[in-house]
Image (tube, rainbow, N blue to C red):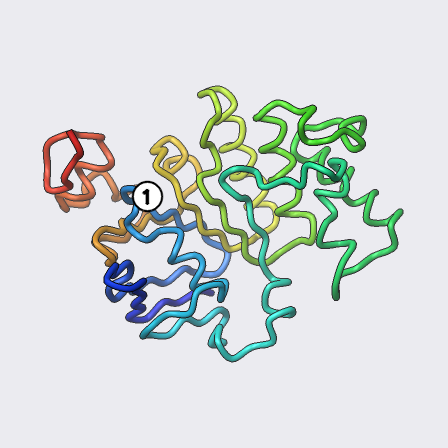
Amino acid sequence: MITLDNVHKSFGDNHVLRGVNLQVGKGTSMVIIGGSGTGKSVCIKTILGLVTPDQGTITVDGIDVTKTDRDAFLARFGMLFQGGALFDSLPVWQNVAFRLLRGSLAKPRDEARAIAIEKLRRVGLTPDVADRLPAELSGGMQKRVGLARAIAAEPEIIFFDEPTTGLDPIMAGVINDLIREIVTEMGATTMTITHDMTSVRTIADHVAMLHNGKIRWTGPTSEMDAAGDPYVDQFVHGRADGPIASVR
């Protein structure tokens, strides 16, 4: 479904992506791991067309992302943002139905609200939450609202950017389980960025380790612990000593 072939991206003298090669199969869950500043977010932005690569090609379902109708292309995606990114001036249901109220996917207001409430139920939130403002919700509830918004338009591809950041371990586990259940039900292709190895083991079918602008290793989650790569081993087990330099 998604292929990156020799993708490079620099910002001035900062060479972020240095020849990324990656394939994500249709209906599978790929998780990208790696330290902060290794280019994980830039990788996702290049796929969405928010950042243009300096070199290489990116295709989604066989179509070059730089040679497609932007509205139709982006309509295939859903996104759960790291900080929630909810609109604080809109009630919850309008946040969830944001895409359904605009553009080519626009639906009548009553229908969009009904879909939003159904998606809220799917992530474990009751209908009374629909008319609250995001500021009235806990961090865990806001994350659920963000997840409901990500799936509201039944996208084929969903990106999750650090889905458990800022959550306590119990709520993080709830979110991980919800993500796994929902993407399995939808048959969606997903890419997740995370530092949380519990999330990796719950969400991922395949894992890719991004370091120094390149994919160092990729393979099934079941093979991750025995990957035989010192970078993967250090990151997965959280060891201070190893080839990945730490700030002391």
Question: 136 left or right of 78?
Answer: right
Q: Which quadrant would the C terminus be assigned to in this image?
A: top left
Looking at the picture, tell me which residue is in the foreground, 1 or 115. 115
Question: 33 left or right of 120?
Answer: left
In which quarter of the view is residue 236 placed? top left
Q: Residue furthest front?
A: 12
Residue under the point 50% across and 70% down: 61
Residue under the point 41% across and 59% down: 24
Q: Crowdedness of circle 1 by 10 Å Cα count: few (<14), some, many (20+)?
A: many
Q: Secondary structure at mark 1?
A: helix
In which quarter of the view is residue 155 placed? bottom right
The residue beneath circle 1 is 221
- The mark tally for this picture is 1
Q: Is residue 40 above or below residue 9?
A: above
Q: Is residue 228 above or below residue 173?
A: below
The three-letter code of the residue at mark 1 reads Thr
Residue 43 percent coordinates (x, y): 38, 58
Question: 100 left or right of 225?
Answer: right
| Residue 49 visible, this orientation | yes
Residue 242 percent coordinates (x, y): 10, 37
Residue 216 percent coordinates (x, y): 21, 54
Residue under the point 54% across and 39% down: 179
Q: Is residue 53 above or below residue 29?
A: below
| Residue 62 visible, this orientation | no
Q: Residue furthest left?
A: 242
Q: Is residue 42 above or below residue 31?
A: below
Looking at the picture, tell me which residue is in the foreground, 41 or 176. 41
Looking at the picture, tell me which residue is in the foreground, 212 or 62. 212
